[in-house]
Each structure stands twice: as C-alpha cells, then as structure tokens.
Image (cartoon, helix red, strand yellow):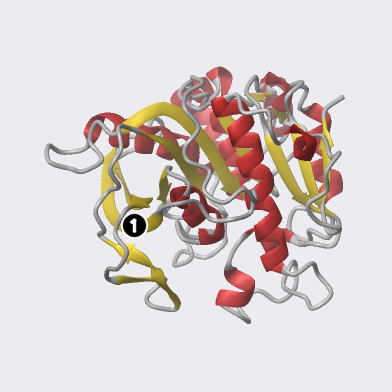
C-alpha cells in the first residue's frame, strides 16, 4: 500500500505537521459475535483541516482544554487520507492519548478512537472477561463504519485510503496486537480452565460459548491494518505474538507498575519475530507515561509514570510521536530517510532506547 508521503511539514520528526486539527464525535452500533445484543460505541475522530480558527475543543467534560483543536472543522482539501485507529486502556477513554491522536491528524491522517463501552473512565478499571473478545471487534466495527458505513454527505465518505495504522495503550495495546494477528494458545486456555468454576475469570465464556471459542481459535486479524504501535501492552503465556506478520513498533516503560516489563513488555518483545519490528523503551517511564493523564488530570493516578523522578511525560510523548512517525513513514510510504532513528544509530533522547529486531 505504499503511496505518497503526506507533507512532512518541518524537518524534525517530533514537530507537528502542516495541518490544523479538527475534531468531532459520533456513535456507532453493531452486533458483536459472542454478545447477546447490539453494542454502541462513542467514536472520537481527529482529522486534518485547513481552517485557521474555529470552536475550541474540550475533552473529558471540559477538563482538558484544546483551543488549538477545532470542533467540527472542515476537512482539509485533498484526495484521500491515511487512517490511524487508536484503542484506549482499561478505564480510559478515546481521548486519553491526545498527544498521539492530534499529532497524526496534523500530519494528514484521519484518526478514529472509540470508547470501549463497559471499560471506560466512567465504568472504572475493572476488566470483564468479555472485553478480550469485544475490544478487537470494536476496532473492526470502527473500520467498517468509517470505510463503508458513513452516511451520504459526510465529509469523510470516500476520503480514506487503504493505509491503516493501529495503535493503543495498555489493554488497548492488547487490542492492537489482537487486531494485528496475535494467535491464542487454545491448549493453554483449556488446561487453565479445566475443572475451574464457571465464574473464574474468562473460563465461563471459554467453556460455554462456542462462538467465543471459535473467535479465539481463528484470531481477530483485520487485514486492513498495515502497521501496529502497541504501547505498554498486556503479555502472557496465552498469546503467540510471533503470528503477527505486520511491522510492529512496541513502546514500553521500564518502571511500569501496572503491566511490568518482565511479564508483559519483555514477553511481547521476545515473541515478536518480524524483521521490521522495533522496540522503543523508556527505562525511567511508567505505565501512564503514554497517556495525557499525569499533567492534564493531576492526582487521578498516583505514580506509575506520574512520579517526579519518572521521565517527564512530555518527553515520552515527544519521542513516541517522533519514532512512531519515522516507523509509519518507513512502512506505509517506503520512506527510508529516518532509518537511522529506527536502528538506534541516531538517538532522539537520552531517556529512550530504540532496538530493532536482529
């Protein structure tokens, strides 16, 4: 799907792109496999605009102010635009990592991020087992909607090309890896759930719902996704990440307390085996360094990326954007001009380590 690289704007990889950013919200409803009834998701969309002024945007009931992002702005002029889909973490929301979603919109991408209903900021951080098969289906439903389900007259209808990046944080990192082709160790699940009570986490659905079993046997790979950027994702013995065959940029934090590296980030990296895969590690960052929560909503998280001796979240955001942009340019647009960053030959920060697969 190599195509024309969107105008890079300033030469620096960490600089915003040449567009202003528009923002809007909508809803989608679909019927997921393994669920009794339809599922409705709030959908946030960021996109490039040529507007130089407009209605200021406020996220999370006005608690996060973005006067430079224009609500309901006009779509920028252009033929078609590539797509980023972003999946929030457990207990998060579509706008949890606006450092990333706004950045890619400024570079000419349409960015779609759903609220995973039942696992949002308003629902709390408790994870229901159903989320392991609902979340990936949410993303496929979002892609179906923006490509085939937009109503006549919608400015985005027919304006999206086939170049798609999938990104996500924490449980959204799992969602990203699932949609990118993770395989599941069915034998491990059977052994774990053998003789277990039906209310043990996940085992009830696994043992009694054939549709759910079939989903995990076949996997959730959505072939429209070309590049994956999981941030601080969930790992574990049930997951076979070697089955992923698209370029994957794994971002991790060395002081992650929620999903510590030894059982999660390191596990994902050890199993990934694509020659194009790259790891971006922040040794002194924490789990929530990949969200906007530490500075935008101080006090919501105590520690785990928000501590004074953690790497400044702004620096994590800057470098994550820059390396992700280099990675996306390399694998969506065949732009090799920043390969020195992706091999670690050129460092963008003393706070980060970039390691390609050998």
Instruction: Determine whether, in the image, residue 270 is placed left or right of residue 200.
Output: right
**Nearest the eye: 127 or 223:** 223
Q: Residue 309: image x %, image y %?
A: 84, 74
- Residue occupied by mark 1: 22
Q: Quadrant of the C terminus?
A: top right
Image quadrant where residue 218 sits: top right
Residue at the image point whose x is 83% and y is 48% from the top:
347
Left or right, 194 with respect to 211, comes to right
- Is residue 352 left or right of 190 when viewed as pictured? right
Q: Residue at x 85, y 62 (%)?
A: 284
Looking at the rendered structure, the secondary structure element under dot 1 is: strand
Residue 264 makes an appearance in the image: no
In the rendering, at what x and y percent does residue 107 appear?
48, 46
In x, y percent, where is residue 37?
29, 40
* Image height of 67 relative to 80, above or below: below
Among the 4 quarters of the image, the one containing residue 354: top right
In the picture as drawn, the residue positioned furthest to the bottom comes out as 299
Which residue is drawn at the image coordinates 76% and 34% (left, top)? 278
- Residue 128 seen in render: yes
């Amino acid at each position: 799907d190599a195509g024309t690289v969107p105008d890079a704007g300033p030469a620096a990889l960490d600089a915003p792109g040449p567009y202003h950013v528009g923002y809007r919200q909508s809803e989608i409803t679909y019927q997921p496999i393994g669920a009794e009834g339809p599922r409705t998701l709030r959908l946030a969309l960021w996109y490039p605009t040529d507007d130089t002024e407009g209605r200021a945007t406020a996220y999370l009931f006005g608690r996060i102010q973005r006067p430079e992002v224009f609500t309901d702005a006009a779509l920028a002029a252009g033929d078609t635009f590539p797509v980023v889909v972003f999946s929030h973490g457990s207990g998060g929301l579509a706008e949890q990592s606006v450092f990333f979603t706004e950045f890619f919109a400024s570079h000419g991408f349409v960015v779609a991020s759903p609220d995973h209903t039942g696992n949002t900021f308003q629902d709390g951080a408790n994870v229901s087992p159903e989320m392991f098969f609902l979340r990936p289906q949410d993303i496929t439903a979002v892609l179906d909607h923006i490509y085939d389900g937009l109503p006549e007259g919608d400015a985005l209808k027919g304006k999206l090309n086939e170049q798609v990046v999938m990104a996500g944080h924490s449980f959204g990192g799992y969602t990203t890896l699932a949609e990118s082709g993770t395989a599941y160790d069915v034998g491990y699940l059977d052994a774990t759930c053998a003789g277990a009570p039906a209310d043990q986490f996940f085992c009830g659905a696994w043992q009694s719902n054939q549709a759910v079993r079939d989903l995990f046997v076949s996997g959730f790979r959505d072939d429209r996704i070309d590049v994956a950027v999981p941030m601080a994702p969930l790992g574990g013995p049930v997951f076979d990440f070697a089955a992923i065959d698209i370029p994957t940029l794994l971002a991790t934090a060395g002081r992650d307390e929620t999903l510590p590296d030894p059982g999660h980030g390191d596990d994902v990296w050890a199993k990934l085996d694509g020659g194009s895969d790259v790891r971006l590690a922040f040794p002194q960052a924490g789990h929530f360094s990949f969200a906007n929560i530490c500075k935008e909503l101080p006090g919501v998280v105590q520690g785990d990326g928000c501590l004074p001796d953690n790497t400044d979240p702004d620096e994590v955001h800057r470098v994550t954007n820059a390396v992700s942009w280099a990675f996306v340019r390399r694998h969506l647009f065949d732009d090799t001009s920043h390969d020195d960053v992706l091999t670690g030959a050129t460092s963008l920060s003393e706070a980060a380590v970039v390691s390609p697969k050998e």
